[in-house]
Image (cartoon, rainbow, N blue to C red):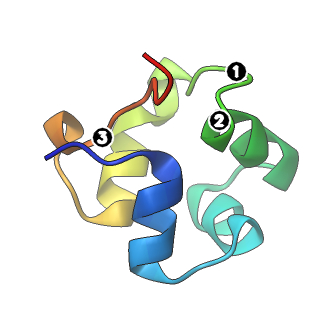
Amino acid sequence: MRYTLKELRARKNVTQREAAKGLGIAVQTYNKWENDISSVAISKVQAVADYFGVSLSEISFCPHT
């Protein structure tokens, strides 16, 4: 199964602010990723998977496709 960032965040029970802090990014950046306004930076893809405790194949980085 593939999860969106919003679903992963809900499963981890953290706010956008907490997720952003855990990933070392601005909350505005995280919000843009979660709302598909901008793409996750390639340099952060593995960090996102690690933070949420999933493999890359379990993340849907494009929730609207």
Q: Which residue is mark 1?
A: 38
Q: Is residue 41 above or below residue 33?
A: above
Local secondary structure at mark 1: loop
**Residue at the image point whose x is 69% and y is 37% from the top:** 35
Q: Amino acid at mark 2?
A: Trp
Of the numbered discs 2 and 1, the one sitting upstream in the chain is: 2
Q: Amino acid at mark 3?
A: Ile
- Say which mark, if any, is on residue 59: 3
Q: Is residue 55 above or below residue 12?
A: above
Marks 2 and 1 sit apart, C-alpha to C-alpha, by: 5 Å
Residue 7 screen position, x and y as percent: 44, 59
Residue 16 screen position, x and y as percent: 71, 65
- Say which mark, if any, is on residue 2: none
Marks 3 and 1 sit apart, C-alpha to C-alpha, by: 16 Å
Q: Is residue 27 above or below residue 31?
A: below
Q: Which residue is mark 2?
A: 33
Q: Are marks 3 and 2 in contact (CB under 8 Å)?
A: no
Local secondary structure at mark 2: helix
**Residue at the image point whose x is 58% and y is 79% from the top:** 14
Specify few, some or many for label 3: CA neighbours under 10 Å numbering under 14, 14-19, or 20 or more.
many
Of the numbered discs 3 and 2, the one sitting upstream in the chain is: 2
Decide if residue 49 is on the left or right side of residue 30.
Answer: left
